[in-house]
Image: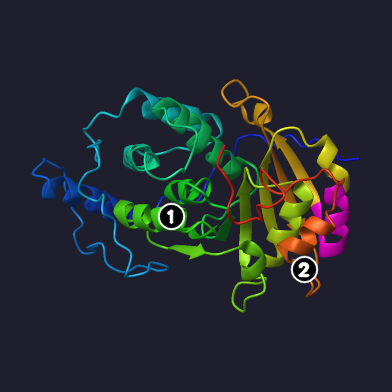
Amino acid sequence: MHRLVEVRPRDRFAEIDGDGLRHELEVLDRDRLRRGEPGERCADQHERHDGGEHPGHDPKVRSPHANTIPTVPTATGASLSAPFTELGGEAERIGLKLSQAQLALCERYAHELIERNASINLTAITEPSDIARKHFLDSFTAIAARAWTGRERVIDVGSGAGFPGLALRIALPHLAVTCVESVGKKARFLDEVSVLLGLRGVEVRNGRAEDLAHERGQRSSYDVATARAVGSLGACAEYMLPLLRVGGDAIVWKGRIDAELAGAERALAAIGGEITAVVPTASLGVGDVLPGRQLVVMRKTRATPDRYPRTSAEARRRPWGPSTERVARGSQAPLGGPTDV
Protein backbone atom coordinates (compact mmCIF):
# COMPACT_ATOMS: atom_id res chain seq x y z
CA MET A 1 0.00 0.00 0.00
CA HIS A 2 1.32 3.43 -0.88
CA ARG A 3 0.80 6.41 1.31
CA LEU A 4 -0.34 9.60 -0.31
CA VAL A 5 2.40 12.15 0.27
CA GLU A 6 1.39 15.79 0.44
CA VAL A 7 4.08 18.00 -0.99
CA ARG A 8 3.59 21.65 -0.17
CA PRO A 9 4.79 24.42 -2.51
CA ARG A 10 8.45 25.02 -1.87
CA ASP A 11 9.69 28.34 -0.53
CA ARG A 12 12.97 28.34 -2.45
CA PHE A 13 14.19 27.22 -5.82
CA ALA A 14 17.55 27.49 -7.50
CA GLU A 15 18.62 31.04 -8.30
CA ILE A 16 17.59 32.29 -11.72
CA ASP A 17 20.44 32.49 -14.23
CA GLY A 18 20.36 36.20 -15.12
CA ASP A 19 23.03 35.89 -17.82
CA GLY A 20 21.19 33.00 -19.42
CA LEU A 21 17.91 34.89 -19.48
CA ARG A 22 19.61 37.95 -20.98
CA HIS A 23 21.04 35.71 -23.68
CA GLU A 24 17.60 34.26 -24.43
CA LEU A 25 16.07 37.74 -24.63
CA GLU A 26 18.80 38.82 -27.06
CA VAL A 27 17.84 35.96 -29.34
CA LEU A 28 14.19 37.03 -29.29
CA ASP A 29 15.06 40.71 -29.84
CA ARG A 30 17.30 39.94 -32.80
CA ASP A 31 14.48 37.91 -34.32
CA ARG A 32 12.21 40.97 -34.04
CA LEU A 33 14.83 43.31 -35.47
CA ARG A 34 15.33 41.07 -38.50
CA ARG A 35 11.66 41.71 -39.25
CA GLY A 36 12.11 45.45 -38.73
CA GLU A 37 10.21 45.45 -35.44
CA PRO A 38 11.34 47.31 -32.29
CA GLY A 39 12.82 45.22 -29.53
CA GLU A 40 14.41 45.98 -26.17
CA ARG A 41 18.04 44.91 -26.04
CA CYS A 42 19.52 43.69 -22.82
CA ALA A 43 22.57 45.51 -21.45
CA ASP A 44 24.76 42.45 -21.46
CA GLN A 45 25.84 41.79 -25.05
CA HIS A 46 28.92 39.64 -24.49
CA GLU A 47 27.23 36.33 -25.32
CA ARG A 48 25.87 36.11 -28.87
CA HIS A 49 23.90 33.33 -30.52
CA ASP A 50 23.35 33.32 -34.27
CA GLY A 51 21.31 30.17 -34.66
CA GLY A 52 24.38 28.00 -35.25
CA GLU A 53 25.34 24.86 -33.37
CA HIS A 54 24.55 24.31 -29.75
CA PRO A 55 24.81 21.11 -27.67
CA GLY A 56 22.73 18.43 -29.33
CA HIS A 57 21.92 20.57 -32.38
CA ASP A 58 22.42 19.04 -35.79
CA PRO A 59 24.00 21.75 -37.99
CA LYS A 60 22.04 20.36 -40.93
CA VAL A 61 18.75 21.28 -39.27
CA ARG A 62 17.57 24.87 -39.59
CA SER A 63 14.16 26.32 -38.83
CA PRO A 64 12.36 27.43 -42.00
CA HIS A 65 9.89 29.28 -39.78
CA ALA A 66 12.41 31.43 -37.91
CA ASN A 67 11.23 34.67 -39.54
CA THR A 68 7.51 33.93 -39.74
CA ILE A 69 6.68 33.53 -36.06
CA PRO A 70 3.96 35.85 -34.70
CA THR A 71 5.46 38.63 -32.62
CA VAL A 72 5.15 38.32 -28.86
CA PRO A 73 6.49 40.48 -26.04
CA THR A 74 10.15 39.86 -25.28
CA ALA A 75 11.24 42.13 -22.47
CA THR A 76 10.19 44.14 -19.48
CA GLY A 77 7.87 46.96 -20.39
CA ALA A 78 5.94 44.85 -22.89
CA SER A 79 2.57 43.36 -22.03
CA LEU A 80 1.99 39.64 -21.91
CA SER A 81 -1.30 38.22 -23.14
CA ALA A 82 -3.83 37.27 -20.47
CA PRO A 83 -3.12 33.49 -20.47
CA PHE A 84 0.57 34.03 -19.77
CA THR A 85 -0.01 36.74 -17.21
CA GLU A 86 -2.27 34.24 -15.44
CA LEU A 87 0.40 31.55 -15.83
CA GLY A 88 2.75 33.68 -13.73
CA GLY A 89 0.20 33.91 -10.94
CA GLU A 90 -0.68 30.23 -11.07
CA ALA A 91 3.01 29.23 -10.99
CA GLU A 92 3.42 31.26 -7.80
CA ARG A 93 0.79 29.03 -6.20
CA ILE A 94 3.26 26.13 -6.39
CA GLY A 95 6.12 28.34 -5.16
CA LEU A 96 7.63 29.11 -8.57
CA LYS A 97 8.35 32.76 -9.32
CA LEU A 98 8.74 33.36 -13.07
CA SER A 99 10.18 36.60 -14.40
CA GLN A 100 8.62 38.62 -17.21
CA ALA A 101 11.41 37.34 -19.43
CA GLN A 102 10.63 33.70 -18.65
CA LEU A 103 6.92 34.20 -19.26
CA ALA A 104 7.74 35.89 -22.58
CA LEU A 105 9.73 32.81 -23.58
CA CYS A 106 6.75 30.62 -22.71
CA GLU A 107 4.48 32.78 -24.84
CA ARG A 108 6.86 32.77 -27.81
CA TYR A 109 7.12 28.99 -27.50
CA ALA A 110 3.31 28.74 -27.53
CA HIS A 111 3.04 30.84 -30.68
CA GLU A 112 5.58 28.66 -32.45
CA LEU A 113 3.82 25.50 -31.26
CA ILE A 114 0.48 26.69 -32.64
CA GLU A 115 1.99 27.62 -35.99
CA ARG A 116 3.97 24.43 -36.43
CA ASN A 117 1.11 22.23 -35.26
CA ALA A 118 -0.68 23.04 -38.51
CA SER A 119 1.85 20.92 -40.40
CA ILE A 120 3.13 18.57 -37.68
CA ASN A 121 0.86 16.72 -35.27
CA LEU A 122 2.54 17.96 -32.10
CA THR A 123 -0.39 18.39 -29.71
CA ALA A 124 -4.16 18.32 -29.45
CA ILE A 125 -4.00 21.38 -27.17
CA THR A 126 -3.99 24.48 -29.37
CA GLU A 127 -5.68 27.33 -27.48
CA PRO A 128 -3.17 29.71 -25.83
CA SER A 129 -5.00 29.55 -22.50
CA ASP A 130 -4.92 25.74 -22.56
CA ILE A 131 -1.27 25.65 -23.60
CA ALA A 132 -0.37 27.97 -20.71
CA ARG A 133 -2.17 25.82 -18.17
CA LYS A 134 -2.27 22.24 -19.50
CA HIS A 135 1.25 22.23 -20.92
CA PHE A 136 3.35 24.81 -19.08
CA LEU A 137 1.77 24.84 -15.61
CA ASP A 138 1.34 21.07 -15.69
CA SER A 139 5.04 20.71 -16.52
CA PHE A 140 6.04 23.14 -13.75
CA THR A 141 4.35 21.00 -11.08
CA ALA A 142 7.41 18.73 -11.21
CA ILE A 143 9.38 21.51 -9.54
CA ALA A 144 7.20 21.17 -6.44
CA ALA A 145 7.26 17.35 -6.43
CA ARG A 146 10.91 16.93 -5.35
CA ALA A 147 13.85 18.95 -4.00
CA TRP A 148 15.79 20.58 -6.85
CA THR A 149 19.23 22.17 -6.88
CA GLY A 150 18.42 23.71 -10.28
CA ARG A 151 21.55 22.18 -11.85
CA GLU A 152 20.32 18.65 -12.49
CA ARG A 153 20.92 16.66 -15.63
CA VAL A 154 17.41 15.83 -16.86
CA ILE A 155 16.21 13.39 -19.52
CA ASP A 156 12.69 13.79 -20.88
CA VAL A 157 11.42 10.52 -22.34
CA GLY A 158 8.92 10.88 -25.17
CA SER A 159 9.22 14.67 -25.38
CA GLY A 160 6.64 15.18 -28.12
CA ALA A 161 6.09 18.95 -28.26
CA GLY A 162 8.69 19.53 -25.53
CA PHE A 163 6.66 19.15 -22.34
CA PRO A 164 7.82 18.88 -19.68
CA GLY A 165 11.48 18.97 -20.78
CA LEU A 166 11.79 22.38 -22.46
CA ALA A 167 9.28 23.98 -20.08
CA LEU A 168 11.42 22.91 -17.12
CA ARG A 169 14.52 24.31 -18.86
CA ILE A 170 12.79 27.71 -19.14
CA ALA A 171 11.79 27.63 -15.46
CA LEU A 172 15.22 26.46 -14.22
CA PRO A 173 17.83 27.89 -16.61
CA HIS A 174 20.79 25.94 -15.17
CA LEU A 175 19.30 22.53 -16.04
CA ALA A 176 20.93 20.39 -18.72
CA VAL A 177 18.05 18.74 -20.58
CA THR A 178 18.07 15.84 -23.03
CA CYS A 179 14.83 15.38 -24.98
CA VAL A 180 14.22 11.89 -26.38
CA GLU A 181 11.76 11.69 -29.27
CA SER A 182 11.45 8.85 -31.77
CA VAL A 183 9.43 10.75 -34.40
CA GLY A 184 11.81 12.64 -36.68
CA LYS A 185 9.52 15.61 -37.39
CA LYS A 186 8.91 16.16 -33.70
CA ALA A 187 12.61 15.86 -32.90
CA ARG A 188 13.40 18.50 -35.53
CA PHE A 189 10.77 20.80 -34.02
CA LEU A 190 12.38 20.41 -30.58
CA ASP A 191 15.81 21.17 -32.00
CA GLU A 192 14.59 24.22 -33.92
CA VAL A 193 12.50 25.72 -31.13
CA SER A 194 15.41 25.30 -28.68
CA VAL A 195 17.64 27.29 -31.04
CA LEU A 196 14.92 29.87 -31.67
CA LEU A 197 14.44 30.50 -27.94
CA GLY A 198 18.18 30.50 -27.25
CA LEU A 199 17.92 27.62 -24.79
CA ARG A 200 21.45 26.46 -24.13
CA GLY A 201 22.16 23.12 -22.49
CA VAL A 202 19.48 21.30 -24.50
CA GLU A 203 20.21 18.12 -26.46
CA VAL A 204 17.64 16.43 -28.70
CA ARG A 205 17.99 12.70 -29.38
CA ASN A 206 15.92 11.29 -32.23
CA GLY A 207 15.58 7.72 -30.99
CA ARG A 208 13.98 5.42 -28.46
CA ALA A 209 14.57 5.32 -24.74
CA GLU A 210 15.05 1.56 -24.73
CA ASP A 211 18.02 1.94 -27.09
CA LEU A 212 19.47 5.04 -25.46
CA ALA A 213 19.49 3.36 -22.03
CA HIS A 214 22.05 0.84 -23.30
CA GLU A 215 24.40 3.50 -24.66
CA ARG A 216 27.62 4.33 -22.90
CA GLY A 217 27.43 7.83 -21.47
CA GLN A 218 23.66 7.66 -21.17
CA ARG A 219 23.00 4.75 -18.84
CA SER A 220 23.08 5.67 -15.14
CA SER A 221 23.93 9.27 -16.09
CA TYR A 222 20.93 11.44 -15.19
CA ASP A 223 19.65 12.98 -11.97
CA VAL A 224 16.01 13.25 -13.06
CA ALA A 225 13.94 11.51 -15.74
CA THR A 226 10.49 12.75 -16.77
CA ALA A 227 7.63 11.20 -18.75
CA ARG A 228 4.27 12.78 -19.46
CA ALA A 229 1.45 11.08 -21.42
CA VAL A 230 3.76 8.19 -22.24
CA GLY A 231 2.78 4.83 -20.75
CA SER A 232 1.96 2.71 -17.71
CA LEU A 233 3.93 3.14 -14.50
CA GLY A 234 5.60 -0.24 -14.97
CA ALA A 235 6.67 0.58 -18.52
CA CYS A 236 7.92 4.01 -17.46
CA ALA A 237 9.95 2.48 -14.64
CA GLU A 238 11.62 0.05 -17.02
CA TYR A 239 12.61 2.68 -19.56
CA MET A 240 13.46 5.54 -17.19
CA LEU A 241 15.30 4.05 -14.22
CA PRO A 242 18.21 2.55 -16.21
CA LEU A 243 19.03 6.10 -17.36
CA LEU A 244 19.25 7.39 -13.76
CA ARG A 245 22.15 7.36 -11.34
CA VAL A 246 21.43 5.62 -8.04
CA GLY A 247 19.47 8.13 -5.99
CA GLY A 248 17.98 9.80 -9.07
CA ASP A 249 14.25 10.39 -9.47
CA ALA A 250 11.82 9.47 -12.23
CA ILE A 251 8.72 11.71 -12.35
CA VAL A 252 5.64 10.44 -14.18
CA TRP A 253 2.49 12.50 -14.79
CA LYS A 254 -0.68 10.49 -14.24
CA GLY A 255 -4.40 10.54 -13.64
CA ARG A 256 -5.74 7.53 -11.74
CA ILE A 257 -3.04 4.99 -10.92
CA ASP A 258 -4.75 2.26 -8.88
CA ALA A 259 -4.80 -0.23 -11.73
CA GLU A 260 -1.11 0.35 -12.51
CA LEU A 261 0.43 0.06 -9.05
CA ALA A 262 0.83 -3.72 -9.01
CA GLY A 263 2.70 -3.69 -12.31
CA ALA A 264 4.85 -0.81 -11.13
CA GLU A 265 5.76 -2.73 -7.96
CA ARG A 266 6.93 -5.70 -10.03
CA ALA A 267 8.94 -3.51 -12.36
CA LEU A 268 10.59 -1.56 -9.56
CA ALA A 269 11.51 -4.74 -7.66
CA ALA A 270 13.27 -6.08 -10.75
CA ILE A 271 14.86 -2.84 -11.94
CA GLY A 272 15.92 -1.37 -8.61
CA GLY A 273 13.63 1.38 -7.37
CA GLU A 274 10.71 2.41 -5.22
CA ILE A 275 7.82 4.88 -5.24
CA THR A 276 8.75 7.68 -2.87
CA ALA A 277 5.82 10.03 -3.39
CA VAL A 278 2.43 10.38 -5.06
CA VAL A 279 1.75 14.09 -5.36
CA PRO A 280 -1.78 15.21 -6.30
CA THR A 281 -2.07 18.62 -7.92
CA ALA A 282 -4.61 19.46 -5.21
CA SER A 283 -1.85 19.24 -2.60
CA LEU A 284 0.14 21.80 -4.59
CA GLY A 285 -2.70 24.32 -4.61
CA VAL A 286 -3.57 23.96 -8.31
CA GLY A 287 -6.16 21.20 -8.17
CA ASP A 288 -8.84 23.62 -9.37
CA VAL A 289 -7.00 24.38 -12.63
CA LEU A 290 -5.34 20.95 -13.07
CA PRO A 291 -7.97 18.59 -11.64
CA GLY A 292 -7.45 14.85 -11.29
CA ARG A 293 -3.70 15.01 -11.91
CA GLN A 294 -0.92 13.52 -9.82
CA LEU A 295 2.80 13.07 -10.12
CA VAL A 296 4.40 9.75 -9.20
CA VAL A 297 8.01 9.99 -8.05
CA MET A 298 10.08 6.81 -8.33
CA ARG A 299 13.61 6.75 -6.92
CA LYS A 300 16.42 4.49 -8.16
CA THR A 301 17.79 2.62 -5.15
CA ARG A 302 20.32 0.26 -6.72
CA ALA A 303 22.02 -0.51 -10.02
CA THR A 304 19.72 -1.82 -12.75
CA PRO A 305 20.50 -5.30 -14.15
CA ASP A 306 22.06 -5.11 -17.61
CA ARG A 307 19.12 -6.82 -19.32
CA TYR A 308 16.84 -3.84 -18.69
CA PRO A 309 15.29 -2.12 -20.47
CA ARG A 310 14.07 -4.90 -22.73
CA THR A 311 13.29 -4.37 -26.38
CA SER A 312 9.84 -2.97 -27.09
CA ALA A 313 8.82 -6.29 -28.65
CA GLU A 314 9.75 -8.24 -25.51
CA ALA A 315 8.09 -5.66 -23.27
CA ARG A 316 4.85 -6.07 -25.24
CA ARG A 317 5.02 -9.86 -24.96
CA ARG A 318 5.61 -9.76 -21.22
CA PRO A 319 4.17 -6.55 -19.73
CA TRP A 320 4.51 -5.78 -16.04
CA GLY A 321 0.79 -5.29 -15.58
CA PRO A 322 -2.31 -7.10 -16.85
CA SER A 323 -2.37 -8.33 -20.43
CA THR A 324 -4.54 -5.36 -21.35
CA GLU A 325 -1.74 -2.94 -20.42
CA ARG A 326 -0.68 -0.77 -23.33
CA VAL A 327 2.43 1.28 -23.84
CA ALA A 328 1.69 4.90 -24.84
CA ARG A 329 -1.63 4.85 -26.72
CA GLY A 330 -1.33 1.48 -28.40
CA SER A 331 0.66 -1.73 -28.07
CA GLN A 332 2.72 -0.78 -31.13
CA ALA A 333 3.99 2.52 -29.69
CA PRO A 334 7.21 2.11 -27.66
CA LEU A 335 8.39 4.79 -25.27
CA GLY A 336 10.21 7.69 -26.85
CA GLY A 337 7.44 8.68 -29.23
CA PRO A 338 4.15 9.43 -27.51
CA THR A 339 1.20 11.48 -28.63
CA ASP A 340 0.83 14.49 -26.36
CA VAL A 341 -2.34 14.95 -24.37
Which amino acid type is marked by label 2? Tyr
Q: Compare residues 337 and 219 and report the one nearer the observer.
A: 337
Reply yes or no: does residue 37 show up in magenta.
Answer: no
Residues drawn in magenta: 263-274
Please identify the quarter of the rendering in which residue 47 is found: bottom left
- Of circles 2 and 1, which is in front? 1
Please identify the quarter of the rendering in which residue 78 is found: top left
> Which residue lies at the image location 41% right of the left edge and 38% below the top edge?
98
Q: Which residue is mark 2?
A: 308
In primary-sequence order, the first of circles 2 and 1 is: 1
User: What secondary structure prevails in the magenta region?
Assistant: helix
> Which residue lies at the image location 75% right of the left edge and 32% below the top edge?
256
> Which residue lies at the image location 35% right of the left edge and 23% below the top edge?
82
For disc 2, the neighbor class at 10 Å (few under 14, some 14 to 19, many from 20) is some
Is residue 11 among the parts visible in the rendering? no
Provide residue 329's location: percent of width, then percent of height.
66, 43
**Any mark on residue 185, and which?**
1
Marks 2/1: CA distance? 28 Å
Is there a contact, CB below 8 Å, between mark 2 and mark 1? Answer: no
